[in-house]
Image: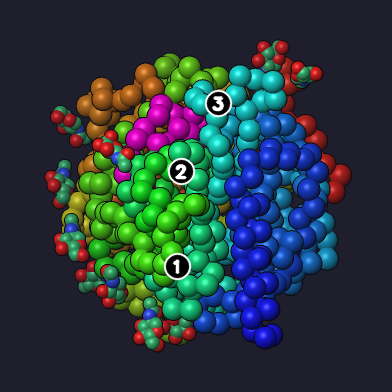
Amino acid sequence: MKMLLLGTKKMFLQILWCFSLISLSSQTRSHYNFVVREARYTRLCSTKSILTVNGRFPGPAIKVYKGDTIYVNVHNRGKNNITIHWHGVKQPRNPWTDGPEYITQCPIQPGRSFRQKIVFSTEEGTLWWHAHSDWSRATVHGPIYIYPKKNSSGYPFPKPHYEVPIILGEWWKSDLNKVFTQFIKSGGAPNNSDAVTINGQPGDLYNCSKSGTFKLNVEHGKTYHLRIINAAMNLILFFSVSKHNLTLFAHDAMYTKELTTSYICIAPGQTMDVLLHANQNPNNKYYMAARAYSTGVGVPFDNSTTTAIIQYNNNNNNNENSTPSFPFLPSPNDTKSAFAFIRRIRGYPEENPFTCPLNIKTHILTTISVNTFPCPRGRSPSSCQAPNSTIFAASMNNISFVTPRTDILEAYYYHINGVYRKGFPSFPPYVFNFTGDYLPLELNIPKRGTKVKVLKYGSTVELVFQGTNLVAGIDHPMHIHGFSFHVIGYGFGNFNKSVDPKNYNLVDPPLQNTVIVPIKGWAAIRFRATNPGVWLMHCHLDRHLSWGMETVFIVKNGKASNETLPPPPPDMPPC
Ligand SMILES: *[C@@H]1O[C@H](CO)[C@@H](O)[C@H](O)[C@H]1NC(C)=O
Ligand SMILES: *[C@@H]1O[C@H](CO)[C@@H](O)[C@H](O)[C@H]1NC(C)=O
Ligand SMILES: *[C@@H]1O[C@H](CO)[C@@H](O)[C@H](O)[C@H]1NC(C)=O
Ligand SMILES: *[C@@H]1O[C@H](CO)[C@@H](O)[C@H](O)[C@H]1NC(C)=O
Ligand SMILES: *[C@@H]1O[C@H](CO)[C@@H](O)[C@H](O)[C@H]1NC(C)=O
Ligand SMILES: *[C@@H]1O[C@H](CO)[C@@H](O)[C@H](O)[C@H]1NC(C)=O
Ligand SMILES: *[C@@H]1O[C@H](CO)[C@@H](O)[C@H](O)[C@H]1NC(C)=O
Ligand SMILES: *[C@@H]1O[C@H](CO)[C@@H](O)[C@H](O)[C@H]1NC(C)=O
Ligand SMILES: *[C@@H]1O[C@H](CO)[C@@H](O)[C@H](O)[C@H]1NC(C)=O
Ligand SMILES: *[C@@H]1O[C@H](CO)[C@@H](O)[C@H](O)[C@H]1NC(C)=O
Ligand SMILES: *[C@@H]1O[C@H](CO)[C@@H](O)[C@H](O)[C@H]1NC(C)=O
Ligand SMILES: *[C@@H]1O[C@H](CO)[C@@H](O)[C@H](O)[C@H]1NC(C)=O
Ligand SMILES: [Cu+2]
């Protein structure tokens, strides 16, 4: 009897959860309370404590209208330092509450609070928030829904009937702090996750995961707006839905031309707004599924598959246990399929307020590399677990970024010396066959440093990310805070500045905040530096970020008062 009651209660909760997901109620708010605290969750046959916001995993949704300014009071009731970042929110003139630890703020220490202002401007669609300190973001993240401005004409297509977040993540059976500490101590690669998740659930291909599997009940003939977020730590993912096409209409909260596809490829940090038309046989069930896109030769990854189930209401199928049909997913090493999709994404200039700069004043070419350091004398071999007893590192233009202990934004604002240095190189310090198959081992070793790139207010910047094949070539999702950038080109091999720019797309490049740089290839982007402050740029694979694949832009003040950095809020967390 007790069992039965518990079972019923669980079902009831599940139904409630479903309803709260699909009610298209734009309940926007201007103030939120985020209490960061531990909570116990059971997944993959075991229970553990994870860090959450308000006890929820994934965390609560923030809902706003385009152009809103809101406040989130973040209270740290956990045991560790924490910061929260509003991913893809450009925060014009407001780097103070952007979030990356020791870049724009010192961490919020246990027992303390920080009231964060979030300034929305041109974003519309879906973004997300996540922790930006150590590896807490694995469980400390949630969606941001940005609706068209009140009284505006709304979406540039018929309004979808329902909206559903699809938050892709990774789950470790072990304690995340242990995984992270062990990873840093070992000098080697981190342990792979044990599962990929959809809305926090691994899905029924994993053991003990059937009851929690995310289910989406749809009504035949209706259109569903899926707000897809890749919140995974280390996995670019393919995602598809059996027998249903997806129509992409926004990427990183910027409209795109509508694109119909049978699968998407989405990197950590990226968001995609897609429409799903519930127009298939209602008597069948359908899996949605996601699995890694991972290309590094000999680089281990979690190759498991997460699933959720779509079932139609009012169907004539009485068999609760009928098996859903499985969708097509490209193989994890299928670069061709990944970029066939990615290259089809086109911007929608008519719906976006800013155009791609044509007259470029600042050219930057930066290599992005995985590296190794030799094992330091005196360090035990068990702490040099990268190949040939080395330590993994990563770099941009051969500088492996060292995160300071005072945040760069306050150091810049208060003229504190010795925290960072200027002069991040605009060109690789040494030119070699970046994508060559066999490279001299001595090139593997980078320099350590905290070098930033200073940009004049209003500079028009073209930035080419050049992937290298040092140690192990792999795709890198590069993310910039404080800006959306136009993605004007991709290519394989070494970027050639006399040939490749001829093929740039300057007509309808998509606007993004995270771009996938193809394995042994390059990606070119452009933006206008009209957001004064300190902005982090980094690989959104967390192991590469932890190894130093990042740098910082300092955008100087312009002349007008609306082009300068205002003073910090009074409650900046102290170091
Ligand atoms: C939106 O429209 C409503 C009714 O048409 C009006 O009362 C309201 O003031 C408008 N709001 C704005 C911000 O224009
Ligand atoms: C990581 O994986 C290794 C090898 O499987 C295992 O011995 C270790 O306990 C794992 N660490 C954590 C924190 O799970
Ligand atoms: C599920 O558990 C069984 C029995 O313990 C084991 O053989 C199998 O490998 C597990 N499957 C997964 C996906 O973990
Ligand atoms: C999906 O799109 C393809 C190409 O546009 C089309 O041929 C196919 O019929 C569509 N399938 C469904 C289920 O809508
Ligand atoms: C996943 O990786 C494991 C070991 O890394 C391998 O044994 C297994 O065959 C792979 N599974 C798939 C579906 O590729
Ligand atoms: C991708 O992996 C499959 C096996 O999983 C292999 O047969 C195929 O050759 C690989 N393709 C490439 C391009 O490496
Ligand atoms: C390890 O050393 C061997 C032999 O010198 C070399 O071929 C290999 O590339 C090295 N691996 C790394 C990651 O440095
Ligand atoms: C760079 O290396 C690649 C792969 O080995 C090779 O195909 C290419 O020709 C090399 N380029 C140059 C300029 O040597
Ligand atoms: C990076 O700098 C180190 C130290 O100066 C040097 O040994 C190494 O060859 C450089 N590597 C590249 C790829 O520039
Ligand atoms: C760029 O391409 C041109 C034309 O193919 C070639 O002549 C030139 O050597 C290439 N430059 C580099 C740096 O590879
Ligand atoms: C600042 O104000 C001027 C004059 O109103 C305007 O032209 C400019 O676009 C504004 N700049 C920003 C960044 O809002
Ligand atoms: C937490 O942050 C404070 C302030 O920056 C720092 O002194 C302390 O070392 C941090 N704690 C940990 C465990 O990193
Ligand atoms: Cu990377």
Label 2 close to label 1 by CB (< 8 Å): no
Q: CA distance from mark 3 to mark 2?
A: 22 Å
Write the residue at 80% across / 43% down.
Answer: 31
Q: The disc labelled 2 sits on which kind of residue?
A: His
Within-10-Å neighbours for mark 3: few <14, some 14–19, many 20+: some
**Is the residue at mark 3 in contact range of ligand 1, meaning its CB lies under 8 Å from it?**
no
Q: Give the image quadrant in which the ligand numbered 11 is located.
A: top right
Residue type marked 3: Tyr
Secondary element under disc 3, as helix, strand or loop, is loop
Quadrant of the rendering where the N terminus is positioned: bottom right
Q: Give the amino acid at mark 1.
A: Glu
Residue labelled with disc 3: 155
Disc ID at residue 220 = 2
Please give the range of residues in magenta: 247-265
Instruction: Name the residue at 68% across, 40% down.
Output: 25
Q: Nearer the viewer, residue 9 or 249?
A: 9
